[in-house]
Image (tube, rainbow, N blue to C red):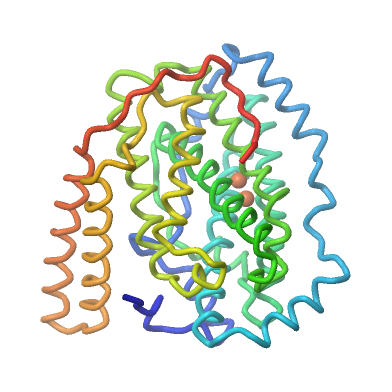
Amino acid sequence: MNTPAHTHTIDSRDDANERARQSTMLSPRFYTTDFDAFDRISVEGMRSQWDAMMQEYEGDNNHDHFQRDEAFQDELSAAMAKWSPELRQELFDFFVSSLTSEFSGCILYNEIRKKIENPDIQQLMTFMARDESRHAGFINQSLRDFGLNIDLGELKRNKHYTYFKPKYIIYATYLSEKIGYARYITIYRQLERHPELRFHPIFRWFERWCNDEFRHGESFALIMRANPDLLRGMNLWLIRFFLLAVYATMYVRDHQRPILHNAMGLEAAAYDYEVFRITNTITEQVFPIALDIDHPEFRSGLEHLLQIARAHEAAKDRGGLVGNLQRAWHAGRALVAFTRLYFVPVKTQAVLAEPRLRPTW
Ligand SMILES: [Fe+2]
Ligand SMILES: [Fe+2]
């Protein structure tokens, strides 16, 4: 079943900016945290790996990557002539949501940098904010082609900020960087195999781009490995929660863009399971548990959650008293479905001896 991504389309710059500002369960959020706690994070336990990583950031192998080449414009013009109106909408939605998450990282890393004195974390945040600001800027250029560019200053001032404890930020950032890598590399590899399906030149940039995300994730892996309490005891329940929250959100969200995935020769569920598989493998560097993504109850539970999300969306569009009652009902059902998924048995695994990984997917 194909449902439209959103009832409201992105037809103007106002629409695009409105979409970026939106705060829903599924839309990318902006975060704030307890900065003093970040000031106290020590990476001494991983000093040599940390210093090697800072050198890599310093080397900045992507400093010239986020610029368009000569072929870009011609490729874009040829490709867009073939877009269906639905593909166009889903692509704009994909750009706006990707830009919002890139920029979310940029803001958070910058804020941490400004508000702490811890030289290690400050240095890391400077490099990460540098990378995310390039990423956000590059996507914004692709929105600007259609007069849909996001006013980042305005977004920074007016979008709602969610408070997360530092520990939550660490798990969530680690996961979203690694998932970001897995998402971009899976698309890149697919289009490398099928260049005829590359309906926008920006996908050519994804390989070197996702190496930035991979490295960002590596930094947080080192932070966790240097503070192993984060990876045991009751914290495993939190890790399990974040894994599920991130995977489930992605699953529902990607199914809102079926045409975009089909245009790449991918199907949303298959694409997501490939991304989960890669992410599960990567997270062996830190987490002693992984979600059992092949468990039949996991698969049916995610599908069930998706159906509830669709019903919720339909109730929202209906509006009025009945619509509101239906929304509350579906929100309750979603909570039950999520809780069931949370208790699907997880897999335990031996954490890799070597904390660093290479992006070899
Ligand atoms: Fe990024
Ligand atoms: Fe990143």
Q: Nearer the viewer, residue 324 or 311?
A: 311
129 to 268, vertically: above or below = above
Q: Nearer the viewer, residue 61 or 31?
A: 61
Measured as percent of width and height from the top left, residue 310 is found at 26, 70
The residue lying furthest to the right in this view is 70
The residue lying furthest to the top in this view is 45
Identity of the residue drawn at 57% across and 20% down: 355
Measured as percent of width and height from the top left, residue 62 is found at 79, 46
Measured as percent of width and height from the top left, residue 134 is found at 72, 55
Identity of the residue drawn at 65% across and 14% down: 47
Q: Nearer the viewer, residue 355 or 348?
A: 348
Specify the quadrant that holds the C terminus.
top right
Specify the quadrant that holds the N terminus.
bottom left
Query: As drawn, is 231 to the left or to the right of 356?
Result: left
Q: How many marks?
A: 0
Q: Nearer the viewer, residue 199 or 178?
A: 199
Query: As drawn, is 318 to the left or to the right of 37?
Result: left
Identity of the residue drawn at 82% across and 47% down: 63
The residue lying furthest to the front in this view is 193
Measured as percent of width and height from the top left, residue 218 is found at 60, 31
Identity of the residue drawn at 47% across and 49% down: 274
